[in-house]
């Protein structure tokens, strides 16, 4: 009852109310057991009940095989059965059995004919539904002739797409294996050089090379053998020079000319400096000739450029900041003077003459302290109040033990000082 109430309340929240036909209502009513359990909770019982009904039907059919009773069906029922089948009516169940057939052959043939007619009607309904869907869908793809020929000439045209893709993948793998096998056969048929007797002799003279690894062979060929060859070449050159005792004599000028120059000598070369300066000047003239832009300067800019007589020189870089600050001070002074002149011009026509009031108190010199009445008494009272507070805190700490460490596991209560009022208004 609670579940039904909750379901009704949940359904009342949604205004949508679907229309259910009587057949669906009867199916939904029959799907609930007497105790109100849904179908998924009693699925096992339903399966067992169906199995029992099927077994009972089989037993009844087996019992009716030897029955000799033949019911009589009127022509109206037979016509209705033929119209429902929409085909040639099956032979009636009371017809004499075929030769060699038992008494139950007529029932079996009738059931088979009904199943075939049902399957045919289902196929016609499916074709009709597909035709209606095709008529409702206006999309009609256009296939070119090449695609049609490819689809007709493809292997396994009657197979589904997945099977054709699997067959194509298997064929691709097979072709890949064939190509790899052909490549291996080609590599096997390549030229194989024969090792000469000298190599065999070297390997026999140096048996250590037969057992060396790839890494050791790489190190030997990259490092050891080049060093050995360099030593042999140096020894051959020394032997060749030893065979020629002639030694030419070189004078000091030739020796100095042949000696390579250092960086300092190259930098101090005056001819090189002159060549560099001439090259820089030629490049600057070429750059200036290629620049056709000629800006127009205003009269104010020309006057400022005429007043500036000193130019920035590398030797004056140390005093640049000082000169900039001096110019800024001069500019500030000129601005202040111009502002004062404008204020004087503005106040020249002003007739207001204020009457001075009480003169201000004399200013205390910076080095002399000014006496304030009552300050010493105020400081004494603050000091006295501070001492009283310190004494009160000391008495509270001694009486209530406020310095003890509090812990949540302490089995006793630690007393705390009361919040006592210090004003007389509380007693009024």
Image (tube, grey):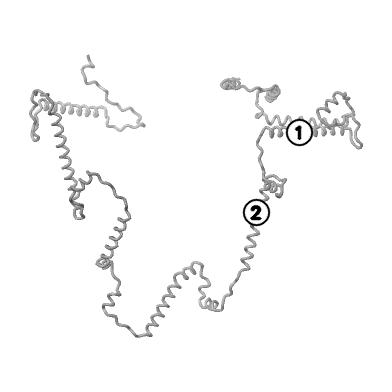
Q: How crowded is mark 1: few (under 14 residues within 10 Å), some or many (20 or more)?
A: few
Of residue 109 and residue 361, the one placed in the foreground of this image is: 361
Tell me where residue 208 appears, x and y as whole percent.
Answer: 50, 73
Secondary structure type for disc 1:
helix
Of residue 93 and residue 333, the one placed in the foreground of this image is: 333
Tell me where residue 304 appears, x and y as whole percent.
Answer: 20, 46
Label annotation for residue 276: none
* Quarter occupied by the N terminus: top right
Q: Is residue 344 above or below residue 152?
A: above
Where, by quadrant of the figure, is residue 60 drawn?
top right
Label annotation for residue 124: 1
Tell me where residue 412 appears, x and y as whole percent.
Answer: 34, 28
Q: In this view, does 110 lie to the left or right of 378?
A: right
Residue at the top extreme of this rendering: 428
Of residue 292 and residue 46, the one placed in the foreground of this image is: 292
The answer to whether mark 2 and mark 1 are in CB contact below 8 A is: no
Label annotation for residue 172: 2
Residue at 15% across, 31% down: 343
* Quarter occupied by the C terminus: top left
Of residue 359 and residue 99, the one placed in the foreground of this image is: 359
């Amino acid at each position: 009852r609670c579940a039904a109430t909750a379901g009704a309340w949940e359904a009342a929240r949604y205004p949508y109310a679907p229309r259910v036909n009587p057949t669906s209502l009867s199916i939904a009513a029959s799907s609930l057991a007497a105790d109100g359990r849904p179908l998924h909770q009693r699925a096992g019982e339903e399966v067992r009940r169906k199995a029992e009904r099927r077994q009972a039907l089989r037993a009844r059919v087996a019992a009716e095989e030897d029955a000799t009773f033949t019911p009589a069906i009127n022509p109206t029922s037979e016509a209705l059965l033929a119209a429902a089948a929409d085909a040639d009516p099956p032979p009636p169940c009371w017809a004499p059995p075929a030769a060699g057939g038992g008494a139950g052959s007529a029932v079996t043939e009738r059931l088979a004919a009904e199943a075939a007619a049902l399957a045919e009607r289902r196929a016609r309904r499916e074709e009709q539904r597909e035709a209606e869907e095709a008529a409702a869908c206006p999309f009609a793809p256009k296939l070119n002739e090449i695609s049609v020929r490819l689809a007709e000439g493809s292997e396994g045209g009657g197979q589904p797409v997945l099977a054709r893709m699997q067959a194509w993948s298997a064929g691709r793998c097979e072709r890949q294996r064939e190509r790899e096998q052909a490549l291996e056969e080609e590599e096997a048929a390549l030229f194989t050089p024969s090792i000469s007797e000298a190599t065999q002799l070297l390997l026999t003279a140096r048996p250590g090379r037969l057992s060396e690894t790839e890494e050791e062979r790489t190190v030997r060929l990259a490092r050891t053998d080049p060093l050995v060859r360099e030593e042999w070449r140096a020894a051959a050159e020394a032997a060749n020079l030893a065979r020629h005792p002639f030694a030419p004599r070189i004078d000091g000028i030739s020796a100095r000319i042949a000696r390579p120059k250092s960086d300092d000598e190259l930098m101090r070369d005056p001819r090189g400096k002159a060549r560099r300066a001439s090259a820089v000047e030629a490049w600057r003239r070429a750059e200036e000739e290629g620049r056709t832009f000629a800006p127009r300067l205003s009269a104010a800019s020309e006057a400022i450029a005429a007043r500036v007589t000193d130019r920035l020189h590398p030797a004056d870089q140390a005093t640049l900041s000082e000169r900039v600050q001096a110019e800024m001070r001069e500019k500030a002074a000129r601005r202040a003077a111009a502002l004062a002149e404008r204020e004087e011009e503005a106040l020249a026509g002003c007739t207001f003459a204020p009457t001075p009031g009480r003169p201000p108190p004399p200013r205390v010199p910076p080095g002399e302290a000014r006496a304030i009445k009552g300050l010493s008494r105020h400081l004494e009272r603050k000091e006295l109040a501070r001492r009283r507070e310190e004494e009160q805190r000391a008495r509270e700490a001694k009486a209530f033990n406020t310095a003890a460490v509090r812990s949540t596991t302490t089995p006793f209560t630690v007393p705390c000082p009361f919040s006592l009022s210090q004003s007389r208004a509380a007693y009024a």
